[in-house]
Amino acid sequence: MNAADREFCRRLEAAARAAGAGRRAGVWPRLRRAIRSVGVTMMAALFVTAGVALGDVLSGGGKRFTLSLLALVLCFDVHQRLAKLLYQSPDLLAMSLLPVSREWAFRRHLRRGLLELLFLPPLGMALALVARLGVRPTEISPLGAAVAGVFMGVFFAGLGILALRWRHAATVRSGLWTGLVVVWLGNFVAPVGLKRALLEFLNQYGDAAAGLLPTGWVIGPLHRWLGGESHASDALWLLPAGAVLTLIPAVLLWARTHYRFRDAVLLDYAAEPPADCDAEDREAIAEQHTRPSHTGLTEVTERILSREFLLPASGPDRGWIERLVWRWWTPRERLLAEWDWASSPPWTWSWRTGAMLLAGGLILTLVGRVLGWLWLEAALPAGGILGGLACLPVFTGFAGGRLAIPPVGSLEVSPLMPYPRTSGELLWLLLKVSVVRALAALPLALIFGALAGHLREVTWLAGADLGLRACFASCVVAPLMFTARIATGSNDTQRFRLGTFLVVGGHLVGFLGAGGLLVAGFAAPGGWWFLLGAAAVSAFWSAAYRVAVSRYWFDLMKRN
Amino acid sequence: MLVEFQSVTKRYGSVRALDRVSLALQPGQLVAVLGANGAGKTTFLRLLAGIAAPDSGEISFDHEPMRREDLAQRQRYFFLPDFPALFLDDSVLRNVGLILRLYGADRPGVEARVVELLRDFDLLTLAEAPVGTLSRGQIYKAALTALIAADPELWLLDEPLASGMDPHGLSAFRRHTRDAVSRGRTVIYTTQVLDVVERFSDRVCLLHEGEVRAFATLAELRQQSGGADDILERLFAQLREEPR
C-alpha cells in the first residue's frame, strides 16, 4: 500500500467513524457491545447448562441432534450479523460518498464481518463439546481438536455465508431462537416422565434428525470419532459438507456482483452519482432518477380531484382469513393495516402450508408404522411444530408487513414514529389478527392433536386439548411480541436511571415469566391455569410498557 | 398551539444535547432554530415530535403534557425529518393519501389543495410515480405536500432549506409556510442558512451546546447589539470564540 492509498484509507476510516458517531454516545457503549457480542455464547452456555442437568439420560444420537441444532442456530446468528454489516452498516453512507469501488466496499465489510464473527461458532461449539460430550479436553489430542475446531469454524461460517443467498434466513433464525428458548425453558419445568420419554425418543432418532440439519453432517461424525465409535460410513457425511464449502466462492461472487449499496444510499443524498462512480452504479442511479410517470397532466388532475387516492382500500381480494380479519377491523384499523401491510398478508397461504405440514407429519408417521420404519415417527413432532409455526400467529403477522421505518444511517426509529398511530391501536389491530388466525387454525390443531394423541397412545382428548392450548398460547404471545417490536426500536434499556431498571425488570419478568408459564401450560398438570397466568402476565406487561411509552420514559429511536 | 418547554434536559450518554431549556412558543409564529453542528437543533425537534424523551423537565402543548398515546394530540403536529419517512415503493399520491387519512385530514376540498400543491412543487407529472424513483429534493417536496395539505397546528421541519429542493420548490415552501403562519399555525424549522433566516422567520432560537443563547425576534436582537445588520453572523462568531 502506497502513501496515497494509506491517506485514502485514513480518510475513509474517519468518514466512517463520523457516519456512525452516534454509536459512541450511549451509556457504557463498549460494555453493551461486548455483552451483545457474547450474547450468543451466553445462550449457548444456558443451553449447555440445561443439557448438563439432563446429561444422565441424553446420549448418542440425542447429544448429536441437540448439538447440531445449537450449531445451526449459531450459524443463522452469524448470517444475521454478517447481513446487517454488509447491507445496513452506517459506514455505507461514508463509502457511498467516497471514491471506492463496490468490490472494495464488499470485501472490506465481509472481512470485518468475518473477523468479528468467526470466533462465535468455535466458542459456542467448544463450550458445547466440553460440557455435552462428557469428553475431558485431555482425552482429545491437541492436534485433532485444533483441526476439528478449524474445520467446524470454517464450515459454520460458510453456512452463515450461504444463507446470504436465502431470503427467508432471518425468519428461520427467529424461529430457531424461539424454539431454542422454549426447549431450554421446557427442560426445567417439564415433568420427569415426559422429559424422559422425549429424551429417549431423541436418543433413538437423534441421528436421523441430526442428518437433516447441515450442521449434523459435521458434528455427527466428529462426535462418533471422539467417542471412539466411528466407522467408515461416517466419511460419507463429509461429502455434503464438502459440497457446502465448495459453494462458498460462488455465493460470495453472487453477493459481490449484486452488492448495490451505492445507489440505495445515494438516492437519499444526491440525484447525481459521484464522478468516480463505476459505470454499472452510474447506470443504476441514472435509471432510478429518470423513471417518471408520463401520464398526462389532465388525467392525473382528474384522478386526484375524484378523491380516488383518499378512498379506503376495498379489502383483500383473495384469502378467506384475510377477508375475515378485514371485516372485523374498524375503519381506523383498516387504515392502519393499509399503512402497515403494503399488500395483502399471506395468512391463508400460511394456513394451507400449515395444514399440509400437519397432514404430512401424520401420513409419514402412519407410513412408518406400516413399513416398520420407526424413525419416520420423527415426522410427527416435526410436522406438528412446523405446521403449528406456519398456521398459528406465532410472530403476529409482522412478516411481510412494514411496521418499521427502515433505519437511516445508524439511527433506528420505532415503528410508532413518525406518523400519528398509537401502540394501543396497533396492538388491538394485531390481536384481532391473532384471534382470527388462531380460530382458523383451531380445527387443524384439534384434528392433528387428537390423531397424534391416538398414535402416541395417549388419548384422543389429551391430544386435542394440546392443540387447543397451542391456539390459545399463540394469542397470549401476541402482546409480548408487539412489546418486543416496540422495544427493539427504542432505547428503553440504554439509559442509566430508575425507569430503566424498572423496564429491564419488567422485560425479564414479562418475557421470562410468561415464557415459563407458557411452557408449564403444556408440560405441567393443570396446564390451563398456567396458560391463563401467562395471558395475565402478557397483558399486564404490554399494558404497563405502553404506559411507559406514553409517558416518555425513553426514546422511540436508538443508535445501532 | 402554545408549545412550552419547562427546564428540559436531554443527554445522549455523556453528551448534553439540551440543557435546562425553558421557553414558550406562541401560536402563529415562524421560528428558526439555529446553531452550529451538534448544538441540539435536531434534538429540539425530536423532543417536540415525541421521538426523543427528555431526561428531565416537561414539554406541553396548550398546557397539556405530551402523551405519545394521545392520538388527538399527535394529530396536531407533523414532524418532517431531513430524510422523510415515505414508502418508496408506493406512488407520491398514495403516500400523500395515506398520510392525510392518518391525520384525519381527508376532508372535502383537500383534493383540490393537493392538486395545487403538487403543481406548485412541480410534482403533478410525477404524482403516480413510485417515491423511490424520485430525487431527494422531489421526495422532500412529496412529504411537504402531505404536510401542507394535512395542515396540522404545529409544523416541525428539520433542515428544509438543505433538503435538495430547487429554487422554485424553496420559494413555494416559503410561500405556503407564510400562509400557514398567517392562519395561526406554528412553524419551527432548523437551518444553517443565515441570510434566509433574516427574511424568513418571526423569531430566532439560537442554540449553543444545548443551551438557548437567544430566543427573540431579529428586531430585538438588532436592538440589543446596537443595530448591526449582520447580527446573526456576529452572534455565531461570538459563540465560536467562547472558551469550551
Image (cartoon, rainbow, N blue to C red):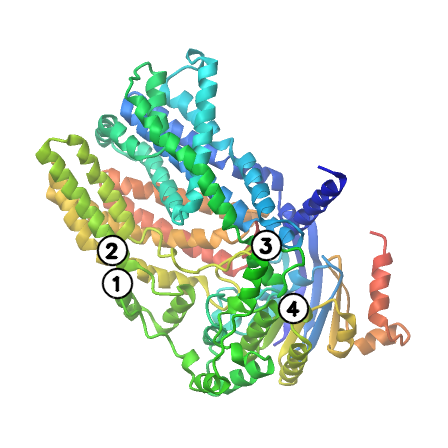
Q: CA distance from mark 2 to mark 1?
A: 9 Å
* Residue A151 image point, x, y percent: 44, 26
Residue type pointed to by label 2: Trp
- Secondary structure of the residue carrying tag 3 is loop
Please give the residue where the numbered disc 2 appears in the rendered image.
Answer: A351
The crowding category of the residue bearing disc 3, from other C-alpha atoms within 10 Å (few below 14, some 14 to 19, many at least 20), is some
Local crowd at mark 1 within 10 Å, few (<14), some, or many (≥20)?
many
- Residue extending furthest toward the front: A279
Residue B163 disc label: 4
Between discs 3 and 2, the one toward the N terminus: 2
Which residue is painted at 57% across and 36% down in the image? A34
- Disc 2 crowd, CA 10 A, few/some/many (<14, 14-19, 20+): many
Task: Specify the subunit that label 1 lies on.
Answer: A
**Residue B126, above or below B51:** below
Q: What subunit carries mark 4?
A: B
Neighbour class for label 4 at 10 Å: few (<14), some, many (≥20)?
Answer: many
